Image (tube, grey):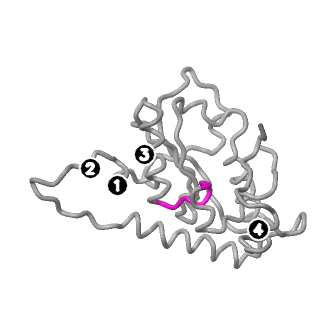
Amino acid sequence: MPDYQPSLLSDADLRAADLSWAYNRPAGSAMPAAELQGWKQRVAQFQATVQTAPSVQGTLFDVVDASPAGSIDPFALPPRNAEFWRGQFQESGVPALYFVVDYDAAVLLYVGETVKSNQRWKGVHDCKRYILSYVEAHRVHGLPVAVNIGFWPHADGDRKARQALELELICRWRSPFNKENWAIWSTPFVGGKLEP
């Protein structure tokens, strides 16, 4: 089993579609600063519409939506350093949803779920590579970046229920590091193999 998340498209398909700079760039070349800022701005503008979506007044006889997806605000969760998993914990944690956010740009990058919030990122995780690539793209140009992770510790203990809510949030926020949204954002940070 590979230690990275493979692309759904072949290299030829990616070149033909010109989906992103990352798939066709020569080794060591950087994403242009204007392209990086434009990409973040497009994601942030969409996610701002999700965050500010008006509540709809219900009636007494409406069917109640049991999903908390509309009430979870990833930007309001207490941020933790993205390297939190290196710490020493007394317990393994709780079932949770987690959100990788660039707080500087107000961009939700990734939505995930776990049964053990304090252990989820130990070992290999594709999103670690995406974060490294994303941060590197900023550092090359001296641009500010503040990637942190927030946990929503009220997730269901049942894996299928947790994953259903995770998918609902991925689709709602269109988080660009989640593979379900790669085609929407032409995500430039998921190509290549950086070490975690």
Is tag 1's residue or tag 4's residue first in the polypeptide sequence?
4
Q: Magenta residues?
A: 173-179
Check disc 2 and report the residue beneath it: 65
Q: Nearer the viewer, residue 147 or 116?
A: 116
Name the magenta segment's main secondary structure: loop
Q: Pinpoint residue 193: horizontal percent, then vertical percent.
A: 82, 51
Check disc 3 and report the residue beneath it: 165
Is tag 4's residue or tag 3's residue first in the polypeptide sequence?
4
Give the label on residue 13, or none.
Answer: 4
Q: Residues under labels 1 and 3: Cα distance?
A: 10 Å
Residue at the outermost bottom position: 34
At 10% across and 53% down in the image, what residue appears? 61
Is tag 1's residue or tag 2's residue first in the polypeptide sequence?
2
Q: Identity of the amino acid at label 1?
A: Gly
Q: Pinpoint residue 23: horizontal percent, then vertical percent.
A: 79, 65
Q: What secondary structure is marked by label 4?
A: helix
The stretch drawn in magenta includes residue 42: no
Q: Nearer the viewer, residue 148 or 160?
A: 160
Q: Pinpoint residue 171: horizontal percent, then vertical percent.
A: 48, 58
Is tag 2's residue or tag 3's residue first in the polypeptide sequence?
2
Q: Identity of the amino acid at label 2?
A: Asp
Give the label on residue 70, or none.
Answer: 1
Q: Which of the two discs, 2 and 4, sits closer to the camera?
A: 4
**Tag 1 and tag 2, C-beta contact below 8 Å:** yes
Q: Identity of the amino acid at label 3?
A: Leu
Q: What secondary structure is marked by label 2?
A: loop
Q: What secondary structure is marked by label 1?
A: loop
Location of the N terminus (image quadrant): top right
Q: Residues under labels 2 and 4: Cα distance?
A: 40 Å
At 77% across and 74% down in the image, what residue appears? 16
At 89% across and 68% down in the image, what residue appears? 26
